[in-house]
Image (cartoon, rainbow, N blue to C red):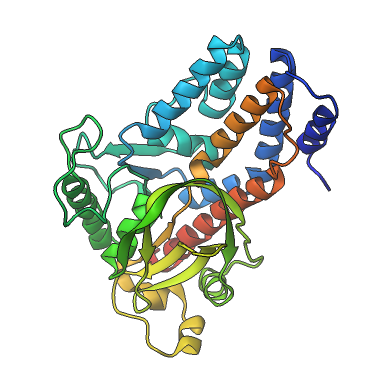
């Protein structure tokens, strides 16, 4: 059954032309309602697993997502669509213009307790109440580590600085057995840390990407995490120039992009030991048997946390300029975010169950 917002957008497409601020607000409001309904149960699962403990956000973004969003919203305001900008800020970001990575995760993960530690203001942190850590995306590059130092944006930090500080945080998590989730740069860092290779693609990918489940890897993931209904992530926002080739002795792939040159999109990596060459035996192992006392890392190349804001910006631009909006595939995107949240919830639940 089609989402109510998709039905509304189909009706809008039948009446071509530039839409009024009121019409744009109505359409976007309906999309946000459908998103909330689609992910509510998965957000609840994640909140239950965290049980009031914090999710540590390791912010290496240097404000890039926040600045890009702010620029788009200011453009809407200049066009007389302030009400559209206000709606997005109020409903997705709780009334405050996002300034850091945690703002985007709150908009997607739900009302959880987040503790942010920034690579630009590196300070000690306490693990006492941390349920997990999320390693965010970054304009820093691992593929440039052996090249001439490049300073990141307007900061004094280089690619090497970002990598070493990320490694320091990750090493602390490994010692404590705290599970970690990598996003984009975090995904590449984890693949590299576990013996994979990071390479620069011929061109940057910044788009909605079709992502497919790797049958064997996803079967491994679902058996390991005990997920009853196999998630089928299919469409999420990506923004990256580097990509990862993983080490099969340390990681299992469960998602990859669809196309002529597929990219590794989802990995489950073990911190201690290695996978044996017996694939069937690997599939039967539990997360406890795989992880040992130091745990595992889960990572994805895509950006589940910015997929909704990016979709809303595309929709608003189309409505304001009178373009067609019926091909946004909202249900696919919302279900993909839902399935990502379910994977994370099950990943954390498995850690909690065997670590007590």
Q: At x 66% / y 28%, what residue is drawn? A: 318
Give residue 228's position: percent from left, percent from top: 64, 68
Q: Residue 349 or 329: which is nearer the viewer?
A: 329
Quadrant containing the C terminus in the rendered view: bottom left
**Residue 297 quadrant:** bottom left
**Residue 175 quadrant:** bottom left
Q: Does the image show residue 37?
A: yes
Q: Does the image show residue 183?
A: no
Question: With 184 as the anchor, is 86 left or right in this view?
Answer: right
Q: Residue 329 or 14: which is nearer the viewer?
A: 14
Q: At x 54% / y 40%, what residue is drawn? A: 108
Q: At x 60% / y 36%, what residue is drawn? A: 311
Q: At x 72% / y 14%, what residue is drawn? A: 20
Give residue 23's position: percent from left, percent from top: 75, 18
Give residue 299's position: percent from left, percent from top: 42, 58
Task: In the displayed orientation, state which residue is furthest to the bottom.
Answer: 278
Above or below: residue 123 compared with residue 98: below
Give residue 97's position: percent from left, percent from top: 45, 21
Above or below: residue 268 compared with residue 343: below
Q: Residue 71 or 308: which is nearer the viewer?
A: 71
């Amino acid at each position: 059954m089609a989402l109510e917002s998709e039905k509304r957008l189909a009706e809008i497409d039948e009446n071509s032309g530039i839409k009024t601020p009121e019409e744009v607000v109505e359409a976007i409001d309906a999309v946000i309602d459908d998103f909330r309904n689609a992910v509510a149960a998965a957000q609840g699962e994640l909140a239950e697993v965290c049980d009031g403990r914090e999710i540590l956000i390791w912010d290496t973004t240097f404000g890039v997502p926040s600045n890009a969003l702010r620029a788009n919203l200011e453009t809407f305001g200049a066009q007389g669509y302030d009400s559209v900008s206000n709606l997005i800020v109020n409903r997705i970001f709780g009334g405050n213009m996002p300034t850091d990575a945690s703002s985007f995760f709150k908009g997607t993960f739900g009302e959880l307790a987040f503790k942010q530690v920034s690579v630009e203001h590196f300070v000690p942190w306490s693990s006492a109440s941390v349920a997990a850590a999320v390693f965010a995306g970054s304009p820093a590059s691992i593929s440039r580590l052996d090249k001439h130092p490049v300073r990141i944006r307007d900061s004094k930090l280089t690619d090497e600085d970002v990598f070493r500080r990320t490694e320091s945080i990750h090493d602390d998590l490994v010692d404590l057995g705290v599970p970690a989730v990598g996003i984009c740069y975090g995904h590449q860092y984890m693949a590299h840390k576990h013996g994979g290779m990071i390479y620069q693609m011929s061109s940057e990918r910044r788009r909605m990407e079709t992502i497919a489940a790797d049958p064997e890897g996803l079967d491994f993931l679902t058996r390991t995490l005990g997920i009853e209904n196999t998630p089928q992530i299919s469409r999420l926002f990506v923004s990256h120039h580097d990509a990862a080739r993983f080490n099969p002795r340390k990681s299992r792939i469960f998602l990859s992009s669809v196309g002529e040159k597929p990219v590794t999109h989802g990995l489950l990596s073990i911190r201690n030991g290695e996978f044996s060459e017996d694939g069937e035996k690997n599939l039967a192992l539990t997360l406890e048997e795989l992880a040992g006392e130091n745990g595992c890392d889960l990572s994805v190349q895509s950006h589940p946390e910015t997929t909704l804001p990016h979709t809303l910006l595309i929709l608003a631009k189309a409505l304001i300029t009178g373009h067609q909006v019926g091909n946004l595939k909202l249900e696919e995107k919302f279900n993909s975010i839902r399935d990502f949240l379910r994977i994370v919830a099950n990943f954390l639940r498995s850690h909690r169950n065997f670590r007590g």
